[in-house]
Amino acid sequence: MLASERRRKQVARQVQETVATLLLHSMKDPRASFVTVTGVEMNHDLTLATIRYSVLNSKDKPRVKTLLDHALGFFRTEVARAVKLRSAPKLDFRYDDGSELTERIDKILDRVLPPKDSDEE
């Protein structure tokens, strides 16, 4: 059975809040506190949650991915408790490189565009 767009967004928001809280308060690995959940997308039948995340230090990306993959069962169990569904959705963690892209674009623009004079404002 397909879920409505409103229900998918509601479940995605609940999954995002649950995973973000777990990363902040329940993980013993200190690297987990530097992970930000940037978004969650649910598929049409609510059986898969694609969780997008970013990392404060991009050098830690591989280690954080390993950490998240090892804790998948824990996350899925806690999401099942927090979100009322017939079955717990599978979780798929994907690195969100949007913040890195934004940073690169900002650096390029800083090099190309002349600096603003504070007197002009």
Image (cartoon, rainbow, N blue to C red):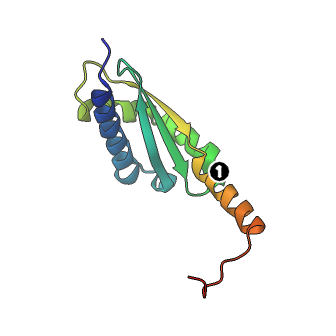
Residue drawn 29% across the image and 38% down it: 14
Question: Could you say which is closer to the camera, residue 25 or residue 82?
Answer: 82
Residue 16 location (% of width, % of height): 37, 41
Residue designated by label 1: 101
Seen as rendered, the residue at the extreme front is 120
Question: Could you say which is closer to the camera, residue 73 or residue 10?
Answer: 10
Left or right: where does residue 16 sit relative to residue 106?
left
Seen as rendered, the residue at the extreme bottom is 119
Q: Quadrant of the N terminus?
A: top left
Q: Is residue 26 visible?
A: no
Residue 42 location (% of width, % of height): 40, 28
Question: Where is residue 39, by image quadrant?
Answer: top left
- In the displayed structure, would residue 47 be above or below residue 67? above
Left or right: where does residue 38 sit relative to residue 5?
right
Left or right: where does residue 89 sit relative to residue 81?
right
Tell me the SS state at disc 1: helix
- In the displayed structure, would residue 11 be above or below residue 24? above
Which residue type does callout 1 highlight? Leu
Q: Quadrant of the C terminus?
A: bottom right
Residue 56 location (% of width, % of height): 56, 57
Crowdedness near tag 1: few (<14), some (14–19) or many (≥20) residues, C-alpha within 10 Å: few
